[in-house]
Amino acid sequence: MSEHLRRSDRLTPDSLRELATGEIDVIWHREYYPPAECAAALPRVVAAAEAANFLLTKEFTSVGTSMGEVANGGEIVRRYLDDAPATTRLIRHEVFGGRQSPTDLIRLDLDEMWAYGATVGRHEGRMMLPGVLRRMTPGGRGRPHIDRRQIPLLDGYRLRRRLGVNIYLEVPEPGDGGEIDFWGHLSEEEFVAWKADPFDYGIEPERVGPPHDTVLPGKGDLVMFEAGRMHGVREVRAGCRTSAACFVGVRAETDPLLIFA
């Protein structure tokens, strides 16, 4: 039986607080980033994605070494921190040169909407990556997964919640895939126990049953949700799905929000 998630249709100080405290499940703000800006920026976004070298999965490409790649710690953490400043400059000054990038827009809005502001995460004095660009071509998908809070790079922040943020620059036509499916919450231990390979990021969809709810984003839409809820992206059958993405870490109510990707 479907269990529709509690949604807000605008990103506001109130809806942000409600998502951060678990009073709602999803913010789906349509045309948060102007569709005309999406179309104008898309050629350079596509070029950057085609030149990217993403290691986590072949199911999609990413501009930027993401937090998912460093979840288990190790040597790749150094690469992540080494690359973060250059990737940030690439996205801001080359890909979106002359216009505000979606990840810069969400950073400003979060800083102004949250009573104690928002800041990019740091590790030992070094900046974490504040945003990535992701692209799925036909055949691309995101298998059901959760994004863990308890990973070495985030441990010092003692996050209460980890929120996922996606702003869509390009989406398939309705019926061509790319929908976001949501299931229930799993503990990190439960999720790891479900996986056949502990180093794989996700689970095959047929193992988890029907989703509780589904969102089909449009061009320019923002979708923000608790990343500890299991979620996945249906296979893109035609067209492409391109987004700007980051995470928001929630700590105490009197702490700044933490931005990272």
Image (tube, rainbow, N blue to C red):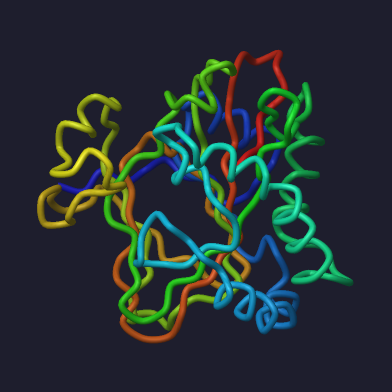
Residue drawn at the location 66% of the way across and 44% of the way down: 129
Residue drawn at the location 10% of the way across and 50% of the way down: 207
Q: In this view of the protein, which residue sits in the foreground, 101 or 63?
A: 63
Q: In this view of the protein, which residue sits in the foreground, 198 or 43?
A: 198
Please provide percent x and percent y for residue 150: 42, 23
- Tally the marks: 0
Check the image and report above or below for 169 versus 191: below
Check the image and report above or below for 171 versus 230: below
Is residue 261 visible to us here?
no
Residue drawn at the location 62% of the way across and 28% of the way down: 17
| Residue furthest right as drawn | 98
Please provide percent x and percent y for residue 203: 20, 49
Check the image and report above or below for 79 versus 56: above
Please provide percent x and percent y for residue 216: 42, 66
Q: In this view of the protein, which residue sits in the foreground, 125 or 231?
A: 125
| Residue furthest front as drawn | 75
